Image (cartoon, helix red, strand yellow):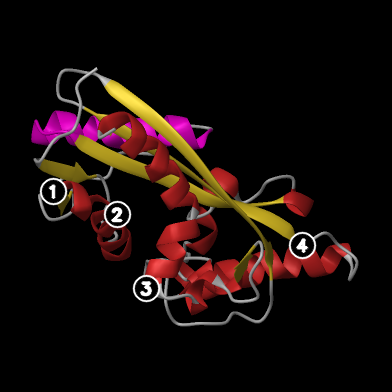
Amino acid sequence: MPRLGSETLVIATHNAGKLKEIGALLDPFGVTCISAGSLGLPEPAETGKTFVENALIKARAAAEASQMPALADDSGLCVAALDGRPGVYTADWAERQWFEGPAGRDWYMAMGKVEGMLCQLGPETDRSCWFACVLAIAWPDGSSAVYEGRANGSLTWPPRGTMGFGYDPVFVPAGDSRTFAELDPAEKHAISHRADAFARLVAEQFG
């Protein structure tokens, strides 16, 4: 398997927030990150049933199209009381339908959907959850590597904080009283599911 060095790495995302977060984690290793979106690469259909499958689909598509090493992140919120949902469908729960306004993702709507389902289960419902993250690296020669991470926590309502993105405003990491969206980015990077996966990636790729 090839190893990453001080080179340009395509981040298989069109999400500016995710590019910034991943770029900050890789910056100490001299890796320059560019997004698949900035290269005009299409987003492949995420047809996998697991985070690993979807991460590999995205990384391989970006590596093949760009002929450069590519890294893809597939992550999501898993709620214990909802049998692990939304899981791989985390982003789908934020998709607006055509009759609900302009196309795009409404994360407040998605957070409200999760909260509504928990409320239907009753006030004593287990609110524990975890963010899961899978990082997949693919090279143009077809090689690939996968690293998994996790951050445990619980759900709160209403949403709090203006930093972060996605479900961050309702996720309280274990051992803290603040949501991910209330944490300074450096604090979040140190304990997030993505940081956990990156620690494993760094140990193998740069260790």
- The residue where tag 3 is placed is 102
Above or below for 161 versus 185: below
Label 2–label 4 contact, CB within 8 A: no
Residue at image location 25% in from the left, 45% down from the top: 12
Q: Secondary structure at mark 4?
A: loop
Q: Which residue is mark 4?
A: 127
Q: CA distance from mark 3 to mark 1?
A: 39 Å
Query: Where's residue 33, x and y in %?
Result: 16, 51
Q: Earlier in the sequence, mark 2 or mark 1?
A: 2
Q: Disc 2 vs disc 4: which is toward the camera? A: 2
The residue that mark 2 highlights is 25
Secondary element at image label 3: loop
First of labels 4, 3 by sequence position: 3
Quarter of the image where one finds residue 118: bottom right
**Which residue position holds label 1?**
30
Comes first in the chain, label 3 or label 1: 1
Q: CA distance from mark 4 to mark 3?
A: 32 Å
The quarter in which the N terminus is drawn is top left
Q: Is residue 184 above or below residue 114?
A: below
Residue type indicated by callout 1 = Gly
